[in-house]
Image (spheres, helix red, strand yellow):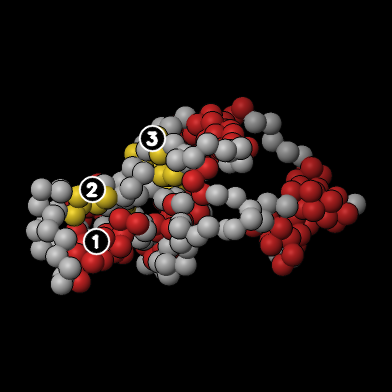
Amino acid sequence: MLCVIVCPNDAFHENIEPEGHFELKEFPSIGKFFKIDEDKCIEDPANELCQLCLKVRERNHVEDYYKLEKECPTHCFHIDSPIEGEVIIKKHMLHLCTPENCKACINICPTESFFIPESAEDVMKYGKIACNEDQCFYCGACENSCPDDLIIVDRKNIVINDPIKEGHYPWIKGWVKGIKEILRKRIIYGGKEPIDIPIIEQEVKKVKERILEEIPQLSGEDRKKLNELNEKIQTFLKSTKVRYWIKDKKTDKISKELNKFLN
């Protein structure tokens, strides 16, 4: 039900009962994204904010949360995400990021957590783009929107409410699939931020010289063949359909087309 909370158009509703198919009470549910100080709450029937507050207790929606937290007359409403996690920005790949032109993560974030650092101090600290995790719900919209895969949303813990009613639990198969995907990502990323590798000019120069010494030089004929192959590859990569296949990771089609092209 995370889509319900973060959808900017309020297009999803969690209290729909699809008659004849399944009953939502047989499904687990995610914990609430707010907490209320009952001692301060007045539930004034004449106050629009109080009526909105009563409504969001039945339905989750992030825009309503922020309005209530800022304007609640007794300051008893507070945002409190049931998801714990970490937003990892791949700093070693930020040369690919162009936030002034892209802003995909900034535009899609439902809690306005992403921002472009402006002061020299913040630029040194964060780089081109940053996330204020005090406001983050860890919904993953930023990770899915980034065209260069520079963001990882690592959810470490989620408060889940057990089903209210016993049943056949049709959701188990989906959960097993989801857990496997989480474990796969854990193995790949290890839950750690990519390490920043400092580039030291002198060391790079030494390594470059050593590599040049170790690699045997190509003959004139081999160099000619390599240049011809490079020209073919460059022509192949300029094909519009190939570029679409690369974007969509259709490796089988790319491989078949490349074999035909080279032969």
Residue 148 vertical placement versus 238 (above, below):
above
Q: Residue at x 41, y 44 (%)?
A: 30
Q: Nearer the viewer, residue 127 or 251?
A: 251
Q: Residue at x 39, y 34 (%)?
A: 156
Q: Nearer the viewer, residue 139 or 232?
A: 139
Left-right relation of 108 to 130: right
Residue 91 in sight in this render: no
Number of numbered tags placed on the structure image? 3
Amino acid type, residue under disc 1 in the picture: Cys
Identify the residue under disc 2.
35
Identify the residue under disc 3.
157
| First in sequence: mark 1 vs mark 2 | 2
Amino acid type, residue under disc 2 in the picture: Lys
Left-right relation of 98 to 26: left
Circles 3 and 2, Cβ within 8 Å, touching? The answer is no
| Mark 3 residue element | strand
Number of the front mark, 3 or 2: 2
Left-right relation of 38 to 226: left
